[in-house]
């Protein structure tokens, strides 16, 4: 009888537990991602203060200004709006590239990186975005590789002094075209103060963002949230791929979010996406970012 009573108690207990919802899944912690917007995509007319205020009003917490701006103007706009500086984008890296054939142009590019580091420190940003160079018919791949690493190493001492990370962005520069190559590039620089600013939309032209995230892992300091349509790319041309709104392109957002979870990414998620021309467009962007973050 004792064994029978024990059996019934165990059976009833198991049945009761089966009716209780899975608390660990139901109460899963939300992702620790903070919404910011790249300053260059804030197309709203008005002063910098008015633009930042508009971004704040629709739910952004941060902004990514460019280097070389009037520091006091940026500080005033940040203070008045309540936005934080999520990152600072180098202002010289496309024209005075770190891989330029002219040594004077490379030096100007390096000075741009150093200025951006100082700006970031002033604004309280912990990272700057840097395009590492450009490879083309005049600048061979191996030469671009060597020059870029050489110039970036020169910026490392100031970055460490200021405690501001240098974050390399994957862009359409015909250079560093795979995540394995990106890891090798960072390893050759050889200092953790230099990491990656991962642009989600830029990858779809020749790869899959979730695969890059897995390989880059903890080296990712910041992310750009951007959509891309490979269908439009194939039918209308590569640049037309960006002509789509968030969640309406070909990013596999659930897979991307899972990959970010798997590598433990938290912090700033910065929109570099069309839609910032008016308050309604900005509101649409923040709402779609929220939708993506919940996937």
Image: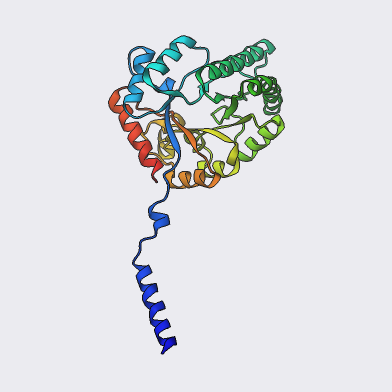
Which residue is the extreme one toward the front? 2
Location of residue 158 in the rendering, given as x and y in whole percent from the top left corner: 65, 19
Location of residue 119 in the rendering, given as x and y in whole percent from the top left corner: 54, 16
The residue shown at (55%, 44%) is 263
Location of residue 73 in the rendering, given as x and y in whole percent from the top left corner: 44, 10
Compared with 1, 221 (above or below) is: above
Location of residue 139 in the rendering, given as x and y in whole percent from the top left corner: 66, 22
The residue shown at (70%, 28%) is 142
* Image side of residue 3 versus residue 92, left or right: left
**Residue 177 visible in rendering:** yes
* Image side of residue 199 versus residue 148, left or right: left
Compared with 169, 256 (above or below) is: below
**Residue 139 visible in rendering:** no
Compared with 2, 53 (above or below) is: above
Q: Nearer the viewer, residue 138 or 254?
A: 254
Q: Quadrant of the N terminus?
A: bottom left
Q: Within the image, what quadrant is residue 61 found in? A: top left
């Amino acid at each position: 009888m004792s064994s029978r009573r024990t059996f019934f108690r165990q059976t009833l207990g198991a049945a009761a537990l089966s009716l209780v919802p899975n608390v660990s899944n139901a109460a899963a912690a939300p992702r620790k991602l903070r919404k910011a917007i790249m300053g260059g995509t804030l197309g709203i007319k008005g002063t910098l203060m008015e633009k930042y205020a508009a971004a704040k009003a629709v739910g952004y917490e941060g902004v990514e200004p460019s280097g070389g701006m009037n520091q006091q103007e940026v500080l005033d706009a940040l203070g008045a709006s309540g936005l934080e500086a999520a990152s600072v984008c180098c202002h010289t890296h496309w024209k005075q590239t770190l891989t330029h054939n002219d040594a004077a142009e490379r030096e100007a590019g390096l000075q741009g990186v150093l200025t951006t580091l100082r700006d970031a420190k002033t604004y309280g940003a912990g990272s700057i975005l840097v395009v590492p160079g450009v490879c083309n018919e005049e600048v061979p791949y191996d030469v671009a590789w060597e020059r870029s690493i050489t110039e970036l190493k020169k910026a490392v001492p100031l970055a460490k002094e200021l405690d501001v990370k240098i974050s390399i962005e994957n862009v359409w520069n015909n250079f560093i075209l795979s995540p394995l190559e990106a890891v090798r590039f960072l390893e050759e620089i050889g200092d953790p103060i230099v990491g990656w600013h991962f642009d989600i939309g830029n990858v779809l032209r020749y790869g899959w963002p979730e695969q890059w995230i897995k390989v880059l892992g903890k080296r990712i300091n910041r992310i750009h949230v951007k959509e891309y349509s490979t269908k439009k790319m194939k039918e209308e041309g590569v640049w037309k791929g960006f002509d789509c709104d968030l969640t309406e392109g070909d990013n596999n957002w659930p897979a991307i979010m899972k990959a970010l979870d798997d590598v433990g990414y938290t912090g700033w998620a910065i929109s570099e996406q069309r839609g910032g021309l008016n308050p309604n467009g900005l509101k649409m962007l923040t709402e779609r970012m929220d939708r993506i973050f919940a996937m």
